Image: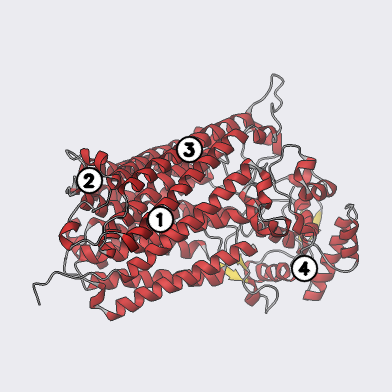
Amino acid sequence: MENRPLEYDYTVAKMFMLTTVLLGIVGMLVGVILAWELAFPAVNTFLGQGAAEYTNFSRLRPLHTDAVIFGFTLSGVFSTWYYVGQRVLKVSMAESKFLMILGKTHFWLYLVGVVAVVVSLLMGVTTSKEYAEFEWPIDIAIVIVWVLWGVSIFGLIGMRREKSLYISVWYYIATFLGIAMLYVFNNMEIPTYFASGGIGAWWHSVSAYAGTNDALVQWWYGHNAVAFGFTVPIVAMIYYFLPKESGQAVFSYKLSLLSFWGLMFVYLWAGGHHLLFSTVPDWMQTMGSVFSIVLILPSWGSAINMLLTMKGEWQQVASSPLIKFMVLASTFYMFSTLEGPIQAIKSVNAIAHFTDWIVGHVHDGVLGWVAFMIMASLFHMAPRVFKREIYSKSLMNTQFWIQTLGVVLYFTSMWIAGITQGMMWRAHDEFGNLAYSFIDTVTVLHPYYTIRAVGGTLYLIGMFLFAWNMYKTMTAGRRVEENELQNASPMAA
Amino acid sequence: MFHWLEKHPFFFAVGVFVTIAFAGLIEIVPNFAQASQPVIGTKPYTTLELAGRHVYIKNSCNACHSQLVRPFKAETDRYGDYSLSGEYAFDRPFLWGSKRTGPDLLRVGNYRTTDWHENHMKDPASVVPGSIMPAYTWLYTNEADIDTAYAEQVTVKNVFSVPYNTPLPMKDGSKETVALADTLEGAQASALEEAKLVVADMKSKDIQDAVAAGKIPEIVALIAYMNSLK
């Protein structure tokens, strides 16, 4: 009995895998609709005049960002945690009834939260703060979901057989703590219904901060929600899945130490770069700008550590689509964490801020790095949780190239659009008058908006291929034995 | 030290938390009290304006329109004076936005009229050829939520001491008072009076009839808010 290998229990991991795929499709589908609406405004009423209130750009926009961040990405984070956590801590969820129930409660409450978010955003119930649009009842639900996850993390850690915490666990812990702190402070709000003695809508609240302070807290949150939602947990994934899939040891422990603690220290300072030339004090703007540049070090530290992990094994990039996804994700991480600091330089920001270049930056990060890494993680997990071979390698390859093309079209068109518009806004003629009216700077973007919409559509097509491949793996893949699951994931041609 | 931390999750977590909380404390706390002082000429929103602000938020206008004029010649030429921190003292939440798919609106009240907004929101491209803004036709039929706006006014007055019913200094040296009714009924009545002033400049018969019948469509509240942005 004692010598039997551990049987990990992936029930909760599987549940979150399902929502990763579903909410990924929902979030990106809404994104594609938005992209076409900007290119061709008639699309705003694609379900007819009657539904226009719920299908127009502005009502759908928060739904897109929140579905991708809190739907797709967080599901990916949770599902990989419930997979990786057990394996690196050498305990099984099945060993604790309490953690099992907790994990399932975590999932179902999360799902209730998702439904509440979708309904409320479509109704226009929003606080307007980006990525923190939810009104107070949903905020409370989110805090509960988060605490459940925290208990699950520390519960599993408390039971662990492996005494030393693996690098990925550091990053999961940081994700939990970071988001908890940021979310609570940014969503300080007072329900008006109770404060006014029962007048008006019960769900409405008013921010505890005003004006410039509100902006400061919001972008301290907004920037670091990106840090602790789109960077930290994704680094957790790549530190586990890339070495595992490639059979290579992590290149350098010291580099991972430096990158982790460096990232923790530097990231929070950089939020000020969203507020350059605004009314927040100059010294904060400068701090935001300077620390954004410093941020290149820990970001590239992780990325280089991952790329060097592949040292001597580069042929795997050619032979395995799964490694392709991860190496490209790592590359996009480097690219995106160089682009961001460039945009945070004050003189560049003067042109880039408020333009599509920022949108482009977000998307090369999220589509190229976050989504690629999450999908790669799920591809690696699928054979192990379903005990089946990945259904189709060629489909994976097709997906990879379609989506890569999609990302490239996306960010190149947004670069051109952003810089074009930024330059036109500031252009003066020979008499010192503004050279262009605002609408000139909008109509000029039409071709780029169209190219972006095509890029987004390609990426969405890739998502459908991904969903199909996962579904077929789950239901029709060849059954595999434990000994086929050591490193490289088994995949059928 | 790091090896030791990696074997002691509690202290590891404490270490991470201190490292990440540090920056927030240093950046946010020092200027907190100073940044929220209103400048001369800044006054709190009336009930109707606040209801309009809620319409603005409900439709995520801030997804495409900023309310922040940066201190560049190109921006002050296009939009007017650059933003001052105190101008936002009564903005909860702030609505600076992060993307200008459409133009900045911080001072839109200086150069657009009620009439212009009425036509524009119904069919943007008819007023600005080439506009990619969608039409917001439902604003003409949905009713504005005056009750919630009043609840918010009462809340910010009680909790954050927002100066309603207090004479405030204006730029021309005069004093102005923004009245806040004692009761919900009083607030509804004063919002309706304000709505009548807005509607006097509107052309739509349906809107005029609605207001005459004591209803306030969302568009009227939104225009009242737009006109207050100066």
Q: Which amino acid does label 2 sit on?
A: Leu
Circle nearer the viewer, 2 or 4: 2
Instruction: Provide the secondary structure element on which disc 3 rests.
Output: helix
Q: Where is residue A215 in the image (x, y as percent from the top left)?
A: 56, 53
Q: How crowded is mark 2: few (under 14 residues within 10 Å), some or many (20 or more)?
A: some
> Answer yes or no: do the residues labelled 4 and 3 have beta carbons within 8 Å?
no
Q: Which chain carries label 4?
A: B
Give residue A461's position: percent from left, percent from top: 47, 48
Residue A411, labelled with which disc?
Answer: 3
Question: Can you name the residue that lies furthest to the top here?
Answer: A430
- For the residues marked 4 and 1, what is the alpha-carbon distance in whole angstroms? 59 Å
Q: Give yes or no for contact between labels 2 and 1 (Cβ–Cβ under 8 Å).
A: no
Q: Position of residue A388 (x, y in %)?
A: 26, 61
| Mark closer to the observer (2, 3) | 3
Residue that appears at 34% across and 66% down: A14
Q: Mark 1 lies on which chain?
A: A
